[in-house]
Amino acid sequence: MKFRYTFQKIVDLKSNEKTQAEWILSSAVSQLRVEESSLTELRIERQGIEGMLMDASIASTTVSDLLLFQNYLTHMDQRIDAKLLDVKQAEEQVSTSRTHLSEKAVEEKVWFRARDKARDLFLAEAQKKEQETLDEMALTRYKRPS
């Protein structure tokens, strides 16, 4: 007699939900890395513009060129601020995904434990029946006249 768990499809579903949550977390972490990398590039670009502004201010440059550099720096600051918001949103998504994954892992564990408990009960019952059969056979042999 083979053990068949009545709720095996639910166990499989919970396992699949956990796997899906892992994929979502992985995607969220990848997106966070992309946003952080983009932010780093913007900051490096801004530093380059600052260097160009400093060089231009040392050399004889027109005021309009200096204003152009300053306007571009302001624009870069705005892009950095927007990218900081994107990074924050990506961090929140990672946090939400981690929470979701931990919830799915707990659900999966509960169902695995229920299945294991049902299997243990099944095996104990099967062993009990087998022992009763062996006892009955031994009793029948003992009662037979020799």
Image (cartoon, grey):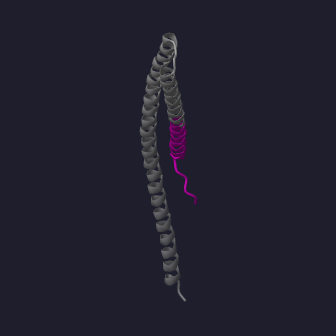
Q: Which residue is outermost to the top?
A: 64
Q: Position of residue 139 (x, y in %)?
A: 48, 79
Q: Magenta stretch: residue 26 in it?
A: yes
Residue depicted at 50% across the width and 64% down the height: 126
Q: Is residue 117 above or below residue 77?
A: below
> Foreground: 41 or 12?
41
Q: Which residue is outermost to the bottom?
A: 146
Q: Position of residue 2 (x, y in %)?
A: 58, 58
On-image quarter of the C terminus: bottom right
Q: Is residue 59 above or below residue 18?
A: above
Q: Is residue 43 above or below residue 109?
A: above
Quarter of the view holding residue 81: top left
Q: Is residue 49 above or below residue 65?
A: below
Magenta span of residues: 1-29
Dominant secondary-structure state across the stretch colored magenta: helix
Residue depicted at 43% across the width and 34% down the height: 96
Residue depicted at 51% across the width and 25% down the height: 55
> Foreground: 132 or 114?
114
Q: Position of residue 107 (x, y in %)?
A: 44, 44
> Foreground: 13 or 51?
51
Q: Which residue is outermost to the right?
A: 1
> Foreground: 29 or 108?
29
Q: Which residue is outermost to the front?
A: 60
On-image quarter of the N terminus: bottom right
